[in-house]
Image (cartoon, rainbow, N blue to C red):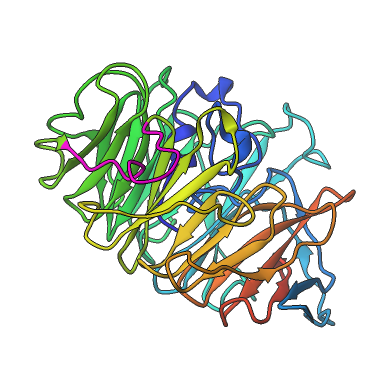
């Protein structure tokens, strides 16, 4: 997935005042959206991974993973993300008191690593300097097997050795509640306090040389390459879309992706970029009227847009792979997949009643991992597909 919305949103207030829902996207209007920018927190803090085999439905067929005979030491899951290579990183924690259910319980965080698609995990090392707790989830960004970032309140941490050693920087509060960002190789773009920041290879994010015109929050930031990005100034002065192709040295007006839709809305939209190219725009209908949101896609880096005026199924969390392939879910929604730029969507994971997706990520056209809440238990399970959602495997998270 491509948009670092939650990572940016976590920098918008001081560490003691961060107030996230259990979703990856955090906006004042964010209750319409749950899992967007899955490059960060994948599960509610303190949730435990269940060990039983789970069942999802796809194309009318039930797909159950057999329960393993092995016994794992169950661990809380605070964040999970994958590198392009497929190596997965996760953050867990422990407490002196059991359970870690109170905000005052001190937590010790640990980075873990998997090279077999979450089937087994090894410990990378302790994560020091984290001001965590039940109300302060962590955001995890993985550029490759060595380069990682973590958001913790107003702080950003960076690692160049796969999570063994970390540098830490405090970016300060963000009263604008700016959000958005993305990765291009080892370059991270991030919206914070009405500005666009860039970092390379695990270093501190710094403001670009110039900024998109106007003042007020940046409400979407999509990354096209290490030097190119498109930002939306969604409120304040000079509301509109702006792009840079020289790493932020200059910004110019960009094409409005929502203009060709039946319900254009420049002030309430976001872009998501696919790892294999292609841009997707989710444009929300003003006032929350039907169909709620509409989609547009671009194959030329956002210079022109193809509108898709019909309503998309399920939720509004679009996670593109390319200009034609994307995954879609949302609050209380099933998981859908398209291979024809949204002309048709296949329900590839029919969620059981009462459950909801707490996060996850899309690696490519065939591989995705979702974190699913278990109703009435306070627990979550990992669900992995490597065949485009035809079959799913339920996996534990922990040490064997």
Q: Quadrant of residue 154?
A: top left
Q: Quadrant of the C terminus?
A: bottom right
Residue shown at 23%/34% (left/top)?
A: 206
Residue closest to the eye, 95 or 223: 223
Residue closest to the eye, 397 or 21: 21
Magenta residue span? 253-266
Image x and y of residue 181, in percent: 36, 43
Taking the image as shown, residue 288 lies to the left or right of residue 321, namely right
Image x and y of residue 372, in percent: 72, 58
Residue closest to the eye, 363 or 69: 363
Q: Quadrant of the N terminus?
A: bottom left
Give above or below for 258 relative to 85: above
Residue closest to the eye, 320 or 23: 320
Image x and y of residue 289, in percent: 59, 34
Residue shown at 48%/58% (left/top)?
A: 319
Magenta residues: mostly which secondary structure? loop
Number of labels in the image equals 0
- Residue furthest toward the front? 262
Is 257 a magenta residue?
yes
Q: Quadrant of residue 195?
A: top left
Image x and y of residue 218, in percent: 34, 30
């Amino acid at each position: 997935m491509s948009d670092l919305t939650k990572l940016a949103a976590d920098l918008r207030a001081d560490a003691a005042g961060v107030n996230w829902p259990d979703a990856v996207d955090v906006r004042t209007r964010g209750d319409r959206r749950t899992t967007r920018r899955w490059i960060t927190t994948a599960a509610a803090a303190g949730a435990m991974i269940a060990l039983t085999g789970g069942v999802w439905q796809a194309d009318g067929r039930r797909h159950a993973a057999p329960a393993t005979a092995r016994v794992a030491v169950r661990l809380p899951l605070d964040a999970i993300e994958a590198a392009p290579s497929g190596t997965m990183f996760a953050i867990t924690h422990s407490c002196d008191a059991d359970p870690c259910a109170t905000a005052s319980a001190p937590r010790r965080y640990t980075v873990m690593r998997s090279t077999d698609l979450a089937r087994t995990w090894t410990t990378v090392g302790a994560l020091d300097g984290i001001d965590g707790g039940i109300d302060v989830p962590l955001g995890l960004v993985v550029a490759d097997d060595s380069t990682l970032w973590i958001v913790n309140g107003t702080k950003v941490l960076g690692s160049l050795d796969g999570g063994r050693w970390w540098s830490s920087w405090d970016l300060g509060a963000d009263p604008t509640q700016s959000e958005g960002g993305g990765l291009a190789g080892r370059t991270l773009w991030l919206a914070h306090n009405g500005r666009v920041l860039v970092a390379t290879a695990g270093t501190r994010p710094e403001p670009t040389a110039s900024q998109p015109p106007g003042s007020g929050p940046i409400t979407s930031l999509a990354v096209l390459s290490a030097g190119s990005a498109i930002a939306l100034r969604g409120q304040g002065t000079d509301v509109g879309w702006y792009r840079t192709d020289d790493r932020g040295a200059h910004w110019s007006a960009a094409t409005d992706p929502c203009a060709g839709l039946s319900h254009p809305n420049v002030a309430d939209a976001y872009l998501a970029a696919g790892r294999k190219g292609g841009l997707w725009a989710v444009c929300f209908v003003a006032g929350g009227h039907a169909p709620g949101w509409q989609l547009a896609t671009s194959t030329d880096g956002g210079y022109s847009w193809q509108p898709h005026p019909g309503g998309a199924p399920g939720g509004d969390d679009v996670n593109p792979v390319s200009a034609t392939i994307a995954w879609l879910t949302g609050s209380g929604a099933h998981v859908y997949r398209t291979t024809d730029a949204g002309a048709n969507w296949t329900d590839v994971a029919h969620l059981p009643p009462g459950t909801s997706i707490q996060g996850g990520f899309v690696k490519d056209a065939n591989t995705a991992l979702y974190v699913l809440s278990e109703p009435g238990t306070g627990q979550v399970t990992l669900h992995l597909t490597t065949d485009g959602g035809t079959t799913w495997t339920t996996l534990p998270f922990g040490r064997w």
